[in-house]
Image: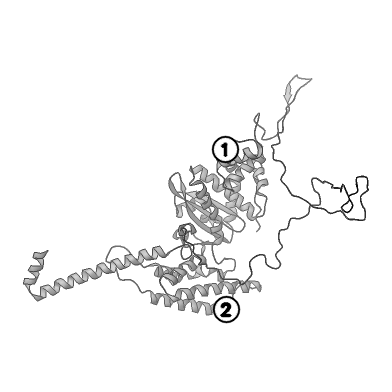
Amino acid sequence: MREEILAVYQAGPEAVVALLEALQASQAQQLQALTARVNELEARLAKHSHNSSQPPSSDGLARRTQSLRRASGKKPGGQPGHPGTTLAVSATPDTRLTHLPATCAACGSQLAAVAVDAATAPVRRQVYELPSPRLHVTEHVALTKCCPHCQQRTSGPFPDGVTQPTQYGPQLRAWAVYLSQYQLLPVARIGQLLQDSFGHRPSSGTLTNWVAACARRLEPVEDAIKAHLQQVPVLHNDETGVRLDGATYWLHSASTAQATCYAVHPQRGQAAMTAMGILPHFQGRAVHDAWSSYYQFACDHALCNAHLLRELRFVQDHLQQPWAKALARSLCRLKTAVTEVQAQGLTQLPPQRWRRFEQRYQELLDAGWQANPAPPRSGQRGRTKQGPARNLLARLDQRRHEVLAFARDFRVPFDNNLAERDLRMTKVQQKISGCFRSLAGAQHFCRIRGYISTLRKQGQDVLLALQSVFAGDPRYPAFST
């Protein structure tokens, strides 16, 4: 290196200047690349569940108090007009115990032979308590008769489902499946609970077989749920990663306020959504978080504004760009306006009010583009990285009709929170169990969980419905048109 520098020096001033200019250009290029890398890493560290799509579990133990919700101004606790849930007095108690005074509270005289005072109304108090848990054993005895004409012996038939010398009934099986697939108790703990409560502990294999049998009998019910979801005007969609036998799979959901369907697949994109069998036949409006695979289906779309608000908060807080805060505030005001107009019985915003918002929306996008000019070309093959702000601006600009779908069609919600709520407990399942042990187990979970979620949304008794599954006549959800 020393010899090369001396050679340049001996070549004259112009050679020295050329060398210094080349070094300066090289350093500037390296500095630009390092600055971009530092900004990228700082942006990655600055993201958390309140300003991105990262789950709350990724925040760690650091407490974050930021929230997209605005203070309502109401005091904590029940609000005026709230019905409450006070324990009601039963008109038909199962047991009635009468308590008589033995002695006078004033003088201590014996009252055993004194009649009850009919002029004083009795005071009643009721205690709600669990009955002593025990299994009820029913023995079925098939007797045989001999025909007097042909001498053929015929035994009495057993009821449907009674096939073994000893077996558990549909109610206990329903409870076990409910505890496993809805309350997310591990199989070993379910067995321990049944042992402690009833003195009987079905084996882990038996409990697993009950889950598999329940899922198998619910296949036609799941088909009915899918058929319903294919016809709804607005469909919520989401997906989340799950661990299955050491690999990453994807659990997809499609849902409304009346029904839920889940499916698990090794892929996240179009192949998984096609295999689920809903979006390929769907002609309404799909609400999602702008994952590109959803756009492969021939339906209308709407974007989750809760995701957009979190991304705008990141641009506001980390990049210090005021247009993001103004646009977030404008979207929230539009949401409030839609709610007010709906309360008045109208089906659309007044045209003048809508035009004012569209103008404001465009002004804020223009301010965003001005604050985020296109980056210089990197000189490498492929697309030049645009950065989080420009990527967000591109989505807000190109997908504005989908961002604002909630204000054009009041059936469309402002966010996709319904789908996120439907997926939330699957993450709890992963935290409890760690992973699914097999693809069949994951598929059983999806089918049973979708059935239970649908029934709960409709206010039906889940345990009675699961009993009907094991009784051979599964209860179907009731879908309103």
Quadrant of res 42: bottom left
Secondary structure beneath disc 2? helix
Q: Which residue lies under the disc numbered 1?
A: 209
Secondary structure beneath disc 1? helix
Badge 1, how many Cα within 10 Å: few under 14, some, many 20+? few
Q: Which mark is residue 244?
A: none
Quadrant of res 372: bottom left
Q: Which residue lies under the disc numbered 2?
A: 351
Answer whether residue 296 is visible to the viewer in this image.
no
Amino acid at pointer 2: Pro
Q: From this viewpoint, which residue is outermost toward the top? A: 151
Q: Residue 201: x percent and y percent? A: 61, 36
Asked if residue 278 is positioned above or below residue 43 in the image, the reply reads above
Amino acid at pointer 1: Asn
At a point 16% along the width and 72% down the height, the residue shown is 20
At a point 71% along the width and 58% down the height, the residue shown is 85
Numbered disc in front, either 2 or 1: 1
Precedes in sequence: disc 2 or disc 1: 1
At a point 51% along the width and 55% down the height, the residue shown is 280
Of 397 and 106, the residue lying toward us: 106
Answer whether residue 113 is visible to the viewer in this image.
yes
Q: Distance between the residues labelled 2 and 1?
A: 60 Å
